[in-house]
Amino acid sequence: MREFFRKFVKPADMIIAAAVLIFAAAAALFILFAPEAATADVYLDGKLVASLPLSENRAVNVTETVVVTVKDGAVAVTESGCPDKICVNTGFVSGRGRTIVCVPERVAVVLSGEGEADVVA
Ligand SMILES: [Zn+2]
């Protein structure tokens, strides 16, 4: 059984991680061609679970361990159960097309709508 896990669990994690990243990139591209009101779209497992207006300061529990906070027109992942905390360390971002991705928690935050397009490839 150990051999089984060593062989199959890691590739599966990689596929999930790749899927999240590809989805976030696709969402960012889509947003560039479909401007609308400035919102932070929160995706969990590739599904849109929340669309937060950036004009409204609030904090939302996306999962039991992940908190997304909107403050003064910017958005951040302020709490996460992931080990690397890359998402939390990203801090507050603003500007259309910006994304915050937490691969371990399978959460992606994508900024859509008005504002500067600022996509880092
Ligand atoms: Zn994270």
Image (tube, rainbow, N blue to C red):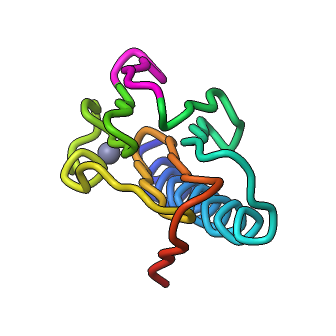
How many callouts does the rendering have? 0
Residue drawn where x is 35% and y is 30% of the image:
69
Residue 57 is one of the magenta-drawn residues:
yes
Q: In which quarter of the image is residue 21?
A: bottom right
Query: In the rendering, at what x and y percent does residue 34 appear?
Result: 80, 62
Horizontal side of residue 87 vs 53, given as left or right: left
Q: Is residue 38 above or below residue 51?
A: below
Instruction: Identify the residue shown where x is 34% and y is 55%.
Output: 93
Magenta region: 56-65
Residue at the limit of the structure toward the bottom, as seen here: 121
Q: Residue drawn at (51%, 46%), measured in percent from left and top?
A: 109
Q: Nearer the viewer, residue 8 or 34?
A: 34
> x and y percent of residue 15 in the render?
61, 60
Secondary structure that dominates the magenta span: loop
**Where's residue 107, x and y in %?**
50, 41
Q: Where is residue 16 in the image (x, y as percent from the top left)?
A: 59, 53
Within the magenta stretch, is there residue 115?
Answer: no
As rendered, which of 54 and 85 lies closer to the eye?
54
- Quick one: 118 or 108, which is closer to the camera? 118
Q: Which residue extends farthest right?
A: 34
In percent of the image, x 71 and y 37: which residue is there?
47
Looking at the image, is 108 positioned above or below residue 77? Answer: below
Asked if residue 18 is positioned above or below residue 13 in the image, the reply reads below
- Taking the image as shown, residue 32 lies to the left or right of residue 55, namely right
Quarter of the image where ligand 1 sits: top left
